[in-house]
Image (cartoon, rainbow, N blue to C red):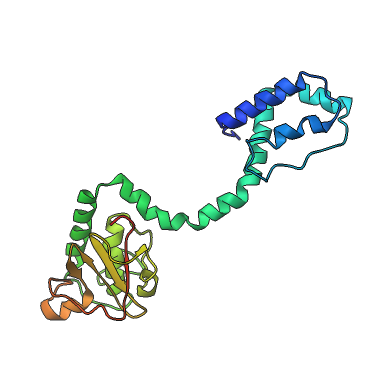
Amino acid sequence: MTIAITRAQGAAASLVLATLALPITAATALAPLLDGPAFPAGTGPAPLDAPLSAATVGLLRSTPAATLASVQAAELDAYRRPIRWRVEVKQARWDAARRLSRLPIRAVLPLMRAAGDRIATLPYVLGGGHGSFDAAAYDCSGSVSYVLRAAGLLERPLTSGALAAYGDPGPGEHVTIYANSEHAFMTIDGRRFDTSALDGGGSRWSNAPASTAGYVVRHPVGL
């Protein structure tokens, strides 16, 4: 297994080796190194006050720098795990933002409009589009999910209730999602994409406004 060593970890390992070249009489001589900047503040190991045995000192002095650095990297990884777990909790929220960073808005919006066009006249079926993004019919949230997925902003279809917590709060500059536990629709540059419009003109696209009372307003991050 290969362990990546950061510049800070490599410098700390070099400092450990330089210190080991000096006489060592107690483990407290290593405590400043272990509590140094390579560890997050307040998380370094507690100082040791037991004397090092001659065998231990010899082992440390004979250990290759790369091995010491690898050990330190593993220790640092262990100390940082709680931090990494907190970051992973937020990971899903930033997936859309990272994908958008790879595509300019001028490319994302045409992808979404083209996706809407592909399913605009397909029939409404409750649950449609939730077993798979590719379906013969779509319900309200399945339709919105299909359009978001076309721009790489979703990995799986969401229900209308889940869309009420998607992205960031409030209307977007280009794309806005309106959702509650019973229904969901969206607008792209002011044009409504809504299964309820099927009854009026046979298409999910509509230029007519719809009431937004009772809906949670959200938008994809960055849009």
Left or right: where does residue 26 sit relative to residue 201?
right
Where is residue 80 shown, x and y percent of the image?
Answer: 61, 46
- Number of numbered discs overlaid on the protein picture: 0
Vertical placement of residue 164 versus 11, above or below: below
**Residue at the spot 27% in from the left edge and 77% down from the top edge:** 125
Left or right: where does residue 55 sit relative to residue 125?
right
Residue 222 at least partly seen: yes
Q: In which quarter of the view is residue 53 placed?
A: top right
Q: Nearer the viewer, residue 143 or 90?
A: 90
Residue 134 at least partly seen: no
Is the C terminus in the top left, top right, bottom left or bottom right quadrant?
A: bottom left
Vertical placement of residue 83 versus 162, above or below: above
Can you name the residue that lies furthest to the top here? 21
Where is residue 131 shown, x and y percent of the image?
Answer: 36, 68
Q: Nearer the viewer, residue 177 or 28?
A: 28
**Residue at the spot 68% in from the left edge and 45% down from the top edge:** 43
**Residue at the spot 82% in from the left edge and 22% down from the top edge:** 58
Vertical placement of residue 155 versus 124, above or below: above
Left or right: where does residue 12 sit relative to residue 119?
right
Is the N terminus in the top left, top right, bottom left or bottom right quadrant?
A: top right
Q: In which quarter of the view is residue 41 placed?
A: top right
Q: Nearer the viewer, residue 31 or 125?
A: 31
Where is residue 45 shown, x and y percent of the image?
Answer: 73, 42
Where is residue 35 shown, x and y percent of the image?
Answer: 70, 37
Vertical placement of residue 40 versus 199, above or below: above
